Amino acid sequence: MRWKIVTACVLLASAAAAQPAQPVPKVSAPVSDLLESSPSLTIGNGQIVAHIAPPGPNAFYRGTRFDQAGVVTSLKLNGREFYGPWFDRTAPEVLDYTYDANGVVVGGPDSATSGPAEEFAPLDFAAKPGLFVKIGVGTLRQPDTQPYDHYRHYKIEDAGKWTVNASQTGVTFIQTLKNGETAYTYEKILRLEPGKPRLIIEHRLTNTGSKPINTSVYDHNFLRLVEGNAGTRITFPFPLTVATNPPPPDLIRVDGKTLTYLRPMKLKERVSFLVTGFSNTAADYDIAIRDTTGGGVTIAGDQPITRLNIFSIDKVQSVEPYIAIDLAPGQEKRWRYTYIFTTP
């Protein structure tokens, strides 16, 4: 089954390797309009206050790229914001993101999300007209013979059944979906640990169909720590090797286990590159991101990393660890991420 997992990673990575070229949008809307018009759930634990956007027709995020459950539009510790939209405006014709004539970031419908957003590789996709599935989104329609492109917006034929249960400190999302032999129940819980500056994201995926589920999922981690990212340091448990597209040496220094941004990123500057060095144990899923004051977040997962990408523009910094999912019919998988926030 291992080749299927690799294929799933390639389906995600092929589109991510290069951003699509596109014209400047003629009309766009401020992201504040989207925030004000969409429902939101607020959770808190006395230290952290977070706003979570649930899925639905009027949701903050309505795209088909990322998991629609548990979009974090704001998370503050001691008044400091860690997330929030990294784009200023939105336009329906934009693929991924672009800039308007004034240099303002305009997000497209499928990338305009926020927080520790997760993306699953598609199931049952074929380069011919038909249906395919994305966990956390639904059954989507492939209208032509083009290869899969996660920047592209696909028509949602069936979003499945969503159940949302909220408490003071957490929210549980459950999606059930069936498309032919492919069927699953997906549960995702975002909860704040009492008395601690921690967000825990728990998952349970159950294969209720008659066909294996072979996919991958990564967390984009749209972190807004420092404008321009200057001075940001990212530390891993293992020595890093840049595998593809090395960043400009005057922008990012890779030294042992640490990656450091040496200067502010310029307007429209973009980096996206793979790093390696991780082992096949979950101990390497332990990533510390800090600014020059010591504020930041540590992200710990309980699964081995299968792929690791670094992405950033001047508005956001992202560490993107992938994990593999391989479920026979009747099997389930549980995984968890712990986010520990710090302020100086």
Image (cartoon, rainbow, N blue to C red):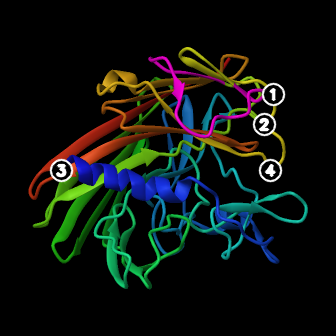
Q: Which residue is mark 3?
A: 1
Mark positioned earlier in the residue sequence (2 or 1): 2
Q: Is residue 172 visible?
A: no
Q: CA distance from mark 3 to mark 1?
A: 44 Å
* Image coords of residue 171 (percent x, y): 39, 49
Q: CA distance from mark 3 to mark 4?
A: 40 Å
Q: Which residue is mark 1?
A: 263
Q: Is residue 215 magenta?
A: no
**Residues rendered magenta in the picture:** 233-252
Which of the two residues, 295 or 127, is positioned nearer the viewer here?
127
Callout 2: 10 Å neighbours few (<14), some, many (20+)? many
Q: CA distance from mark 4 to mark 1?
A: 15 Å
Q: CA distance from mark 2 to mark 1?
A: 8 Å
Which of the two residues, 10 or 320, is positioned nearer the viewer here?
10
Q: Quadrant of the C terminus?
A: top right
The three-letter amino acid code for the residue at tag 2 is Gly
Numbered badge on residue 268: 4
